[in-house]
Amino acid sequence: MISKHTYGNPFPTEAVVGEASQAQGDPSCGEVSLEEGFRFSCRMGADDAVYGLGEASRGLNKRGYRYVNSCTDATSHSETAFSLYSAHNFVVVAGKETFGLFFDYPAQITFDIGYTRMDTMTVACARADLDLYVITGEGPYDVVRQFRKLIGPSYIPPKFAFGFGQSRWGYKTPEDFANVADGYRNNKLPLDMLYMDIDYMQDYKDFTVNEEVFPDFPAFVAEMKRRGIRLVPIIDAGVKAEKGYSICDEGIEKGYFCTRADGSTFVAAVWPGDSHFPDVLNPEARAWFGSKYQILTDAGIEGFWNDMNEPTIFYTPELTAQTRANLEKAFQDGAYTPDMLRKPKTEDRGDYERFYHKTIAGVKRHDEVHNLYGYNMTRAAGEALARIDPDKRFLLFSRSSYIGMHRYGGIWTGDNCSWWSHILLNLRMMASLNMCGFLYTGADLGGFGGNATCDLLLRWMALGVFTPLMRNHAAWDTRRQECYQFENTEDFRHILEVRYRLIPYIYSEYMKAALNDDLIFKPLAFVYPEDRMSAQVEDQLMMGSEIMIAPVYTQNARGRYVYLPEEMEFVKFLPCGKISREVLPAGHHYVEIALNEVPLFIRKGKCIPLAGPAETVDAIDTEHLTMLGYSGEYEFYDDDGVHKDYTDPRNYKVLRNI
Ligand code: GLC
């Protein structure tokens, strides 16, 4: 059951596409106060768990912290981060009473989940203009499924996007890319995508390619594709402010950029220096910005990653002037202290109050609709790509998002670090993100910031084997971490080989989840609701309907403890190519897992398909699959991975393990 409680005059975020019955009065699961903005609070029982929040720090169970949903360029996201890049305002309180809450509100909103008082959850925002959806059901999984129906179907990428991708901020020239391609191909390391970070552009200008460096870009794209590698360029939110740059000129002329209060075009600095921000909340401007992706699809590009779309602002002329004035005054008054030079945090800078959008609900100051920017930038691309080639699937993912964006693209989890704790964070986020509709997701494997070690990358990749988006990405000033940079290339080859052998299964489970508004990754408690121990497990996930994953995420560990809610087959892909299998009874076990092994657990009575090794997704032979696990049947989904005819009954096959 879903009821919708409307307060004030909510902004039409277009997050929800399904039906909910309009309720009168406040929800019975908590108390609402409208004294200062909006505030919902409810008591939590000692054993209640709180799931959801999509991209957020900390555990699967979100109790015990405060999360500020305000899309932020979270440059170093640690356990204490209140805000990350996205705002996913959905939680499920699971206990004696179970209910889900979706606060459809486009600006900053705070979830205090047992932070101020351990037994109380309070959700508050500055203005009482929102729709609050309350979902009741049989348990947390049922509540999540209803929510997923409410927000509409998840984005479906092309099949090649399930291959492995290599990225690094700093690849600049065709030679740089060719060297990485050679590194992979010469070492027989599977690879499907090379990501192009901002350096491919001319002066960081969106939809341009540095023509001196890439004199014949379409030919380069085609040559890479001939080698089985798709190039995936980045697109940033900020458009360089430069006379003579057609996108800038056109945007100004048509009034498609965000404006200041006085109507002049808003300016803020990002990578290209002074930049303008396409007003993606204005449908006309959104269609215009989206149409520019065709410049690159015409060159043969089939995928994009949208970045800096919180939007990130390094500084505005207003802030610089204000800081200078403050400093001068402080000097004159003798009140200067060195920390006055420190750059204020984005949320304290006032920059989001300096510009405006022309939205479907009238003119809005940015801070009032802040969390919708990345969503609508990616929607611009998604809608345009569907116009450019209606039956073709494109790869598309974003850094910032709001619920609703899951229909247009996936997300990656931003600038993580080469920390062991970020492997665990990656794992937990997968389930929380799935609850909010984001199925095509993954983290920067090996870590974006910091220096990756060989063992960290191996362990992280053994988790990445299971994440739909499997990409190794790092910042320019870090140790090189492509899979051929370490002495034991064969171990990386083995892990990637396992990924490709599992792609038929991963793809099948992805498609079934996307087509049925289901989750790929679930907390154990969703599958074993009667088992009290399952609710405690924070470092294992159920994947699809057949398997459980339990990666190793601590350095120097030779294995790990794992909890089995029922009998399962413990499978290890060994570097020699063999597969070790052992049936383990329900309960706690210590399992040994070497650095170059990939573990998974098959649920009792279930089996999964396995392909032979391949170096690209296109080369996977799905006609000759073997089965792994218990004897039984598996419902296998497959299609050409390119077009959108998902409902063809021939896409489903029953595979038997005898
Ligand atoms: C941002 C992105 C990162 C990218 C960098 C340069 O920090 O999150 O992935 O490499 O910008 O474009």
Image (tube, grey):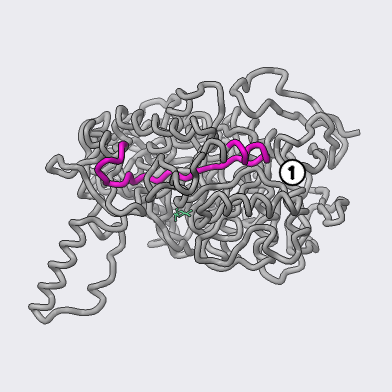
Numbered range of the magenta stretch: 222-246
For label 1, the crowd category at 10 Å Cα-Cα, with few meaning under 14, some 14 to 19 and many 20 or more, is many
Q: Residue at x 47, y 28 (%)?
A: 385
- Percent of width and height locating residue 309: 38, 46
Which quadrant: the C terminus? top right
Q: Is residue 223 magenta?
A: yes
Going by the picture, which residue comes out furthest to the right? Answer: 658
Count the marks: how many?
1
Q: Quadrant of residue 294?
A: top left
Q: Residue at x 60, y 60 (%)?
A: 446
Q: Nearer the viewer, residue 311 or 84?
A: 311
- Percent of width and height locating residue 526: 63, 43
Q: Residue at x 15, y 43 (%)?
A: 261
- Percent of width and height locating residue 161: 61, 39
Q: Quadrant of residue 371?
A: top left
Q: Nearer the viewer, residue 631 or 220?
A: 220
- Percent of width and height locating residue 228: 67, 39
Q: Is residue 576 magenta?
A: no
Going by the picture, which residue comes out furthest to the left? Answer: 332
Q: Nearer the viewer, residue 619 or 382?
A: 619
